[in-house]
Amino acid sequence: MVGDAIERAPVALPMVPAVSPGGEEIASVEATASGGRRCSLRWMGKERPYYGRRKVETGTKKQVVRKRAKLDFGKQVSEAPSASFQSGELVDLNTGGGLEGEAVLNGGGGNAVNGEGGDWDQTGPGKSAQARVKETLRAFNSHYLHFVQRGGGCEEDVKRASKRPDLKAISKMIKMGTVLYPEKRIGHLPGIDVGHQFYSRAEMVVVGLHSHWLNGIDYMGQSYAKLVIYKEQYKGYKFPLAVCIVLSGMYEDDLDNSENIVYTGQGGHDLLGNKHQIRDQKMERGNLALKNSMENGLPVRVVRGHESASSYCGKIYTYDGLYKVGRYWAEKGISGFTVFKYQLKRLEAQPRLMTGQVRFTHAQAPTSFSELQGLVCPDISGGQEKFPIPVTNMVDDLPVAPIGFTYQKSLQVADNLKIPMNTVGCKCKGYCIDPRTCACARLNGSDFPYVHKDGGRLVEAKAVVFECGPNCGCGVDCVNRTSQQGLKYRLEVFRTPNKGWAVRSWDTIPSGAPICEYTGILRKTDDVENVSENNYIFDIDCLQTMQGLDGRARRPGDISFLTNFDDKKSEVPEYCIDAGSIGNVARFINHSCQPNLFVQCILSLHHDIKMAKIMLFAADTISPLQELTYDYGYALDSVVGSDGKIIKMPCYCGAADCRKRLY
């Protein structure tokens, strides 16, 4: 770790010749294959991509690469597979009543034995099942944060369920018909593979994996047997039928040995949480459903919960695949009351079990540098950030850290530019609390864009976020300064086999949380046209997004009063951030066609949207060691070479909905 002596000084990294994977030296360019150019293995010897409209250069100037702040990919979901619920009340989906659609035995295309969730959902043309699951969870998190913003109750308060923001979000999605799989299904669900993590019971409800936020056994009720569309499919089966169980240590008589489970039936349990039985269980509802599933030889989905401080409910739930009920019996439990026991055995030929004995066994993030393999730099920021940012390289034969740039956590301004400082600011003292009196909150639609939860989370992606600035009366810890408070999560820069350098987090990052600013040198676009081999130029095209150019979706927010908002409907960004020689960790974050981050424009010093601050936020809840990515915003066939021919570049993001081409 670098000492405090250079805490505020930029870290200068030398320029060296690049070496190809085969060992050949490549003509001196900054930060190549062994030196940190974004996705350098893809770019070698090829034209760099351009984000937006491409001009064919006829002179001697070389084309410049730009990242564009395309804002579409952070938008919230407004449409999802329809359901037939007609009420906004909290609904017990276990009844099975009022449902439409076919309950597919093997999960609508998933394999009931091999553990695959199925790549494509038949109800969602044009999108993979994985993408629909992700969109549904994003919609839930958006609703959840809106209810938190309105002052919802505590998630752990079972007695006051009507006050809980997560349950309010479930009810809203049921009313809107946006529960992904509202009909009960036996077997795997498309897009939910073994090992999929959920950060609350509510998330499992909205995707349809387990349709009740409290009960342990989810089942298809008698109403399924009466519906015409199910009569032939389930002919000869005895209802109710179990579809999913949650094992999270709630019953004192449970026994979990990973591949084999002894599961305690439902009922007679003290809901106050001490896990004790207080009355006898009965052979009805979920208990009867498990018995019938055994007699019919049908598999049951198993979800395990484990303690985790990363989840707002205190647990993370992992889908562990399909099990079959081998036998059941009744006995006197530890507390002296009759309980039903069910022995379940995991089906073979499924992916490796991700949890065991209700303990989390996913790949764990390191707790210290001594645990890091391939460490080539203990802190690429040189002590500038709140946390050191280590660099690891387990790919190259001669591993080195990124080179050819100076780390700088704050945005620098070109000598010929001057940032306006003309905002009036709010008159709040200490913290901004009341949106009715805070001038900055009024700019955001008379509400704060962030909630205090988890140190500040953006409720939804907006056209622009107005934060408190230097002329405001509040302090640095005000929630409306969330993006100004530096890194909140431990990050690592690591080498990938085919995408160059990349970034991941050691911590769980909740949706809406700030990741980092995209820093570099703020320049006029025209001033960088003659800069070649620069893959780190980010066009500030927030204005173009607000105007809906290039088919980009508009975000909520009134921004008509902004400086330069109606500047001749400009199609070309006037300013950009050049991170070629100076930048921060954001310059190493890769593209994905199915990203987990989104770009947000922020104003605090001034109201000139053309010079907006560029921030990256979490679009999803991101697990530790998952690569951080955002959509670079390419349009296919938008990159044209100096000869006028369209240049095509393959994409290696690996997403289920990968477009196969970057441009």
Image (cartoon, grey):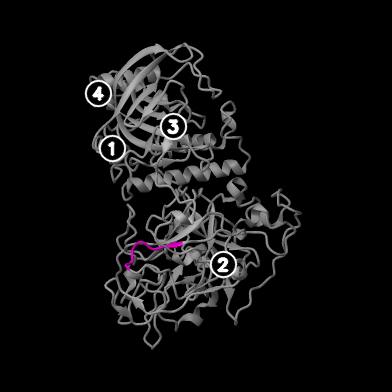
Q: Marks 3 and 4: in contact by CB < 8 Å? A: no
The residue positioned 38% from the left and 59% from the top of the image is 592
Q: Amino acid at mark 3?
A: Phe
Q: Amino acid at mark 4?
A: Gly
Q: Which residue is mark 3?
A: 85
Distance between the alpha carbons at the discs numbered 3 and 2? 49 Å
Range covered by the magenta-colored residues: 391-397
Q: Which residue is mark 2?
A: 409
Badge 4 element: loop
Mark 1 and mark 4 lie on one chain; the one further toward the N terminus is 1
The residue positioned 50% from the left and 78% from the top of the image is 525
Q: Which residue is mark 4?
A: 297
Q: Marks 4 and 2: in contact by CB < 8 Å? A: no
**Near-viewer residue (451 or 366):** 366
Numbered tag placed on residue 108 in the rendering: 1
Q: Is residue 394 magenta?
A: yes
Distance between the alpha carbons at the discs numbered 1 and 2? 48 Å
Q: Residue furthest front?
A: 370
Is residue 145 positioned above or below 414 on the image? above
Mark 1 and mark 2 lie on one chain; the one further toward the N terminus is 1
Task: Give percent across and percent down for residue 203.
Answer: 45, 38
Is disc 3 surrounded by few (<14), some (14 to 19) or many (20+) residues within 10 Å? many
